[in-house]
Image (cartoon, grey):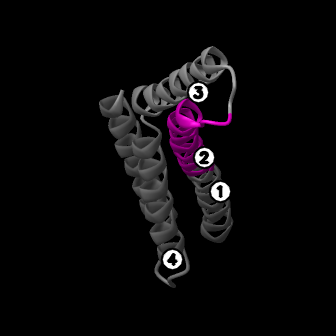
Amino acid sequence: MTEEHLVRTKAILVAQEGKYRRSAMRWKFAYRFLLVVSALLASAAAIISKLSFLDDKALSADWSSMLAGTAAVLTTLLAALDFESNFRINRRSRHQVQILLLDAEKSEAVPDKLLEGLQQVVSRRTHDLDKAD
């Protein structure tokens, strides 16, 4: 029974590590993508307003305002949804589960202790995410 229990525990740990890996990757990608797009839009807004070859100054001012506004919205979303904290919390949780997976490979591995460790990781992650809100 212990060997079967250990195999099942390892499967749970692997599944949880995969969830944290995917979540961290998504938050990291979204954070960096929105940050870069926001910076590009803000820069484009400044450049468009100063282009002398555009004949219609009102049109360039309109485009500049729209780009700057969009950049401001993206920056606000980054701050409000706390992309960076979510990315870091999930990455830290993934690393903690990876440590548990290494512990599971030890000859004296105890499935119940590994599951208790996973419970602590989940609890800590939940607490950190609630704190980040």
**On the image, numbered disc 1 is attached to which residue?**
18
Q: Position of residue 132 (x, y in %)?
A: 34, 33
Between 103 and 87, the residue placed more toward the observer is 87
Q: Position of residue 20 (x, y in %)?
A: 57, 51
The single residue placed furthest to the left in the displayed view is: 131
- Tag nearer the camera, 4 or 1: 1
Give me the disc on residue 33: 2
Question: Mark 2 is on which residue type?
Answer: Phe
Q: State whether residue 42 is above or below residue 109.
A: above
Magenta highlight on residue 40: yes
Instruction: Give the distance between the C-alpha atoms of the residues marked 4 and 1, in whole angstroms.
Output: 15 Å
Residue beneath the point at 54% across and 20% down: 65
The answer to whether 101 appears left or right of 53 in the picture is left
Magenta highlight on residue 33: yes
Residue beneath the point at 60% across and 67% down: 2
Among the two numbered marks 4 and 2 on one chain, the one whose residue lies closer to the N terminus: 2
Among the two numbered marks 3 and 1 on one chain, the one whose residue lies closer to the N terminus: 1
Q: Are marks 3 and 1 in contact (CB under 8 Å)?
A: no
- Tag nearer the camera, 1 or 2: 2
Q: State whether residue 20 is above or below residue 38.
A: below
Among the two numbered marks 3 and 2 on one chain, the one whose residue lies closer to the N terminus: 2
Question: Mark 4 is on which residue type?
Answer: Leu
Instruction: Give the distance between the C-alpha atoms of the residues marked 3 and 2, in whole angstroms.
Output: 16 Å
Residue beneath the point at 47% across and 67% down: 100
Q: SS at mark 2?
A: helix
**On the image, numbered disc 4 is attached to which residue?**
102
Instruction: Give the distance between the C-alpha atoms of the residues marked 1 and 2, in whole angstroms.
Output: 22 Å
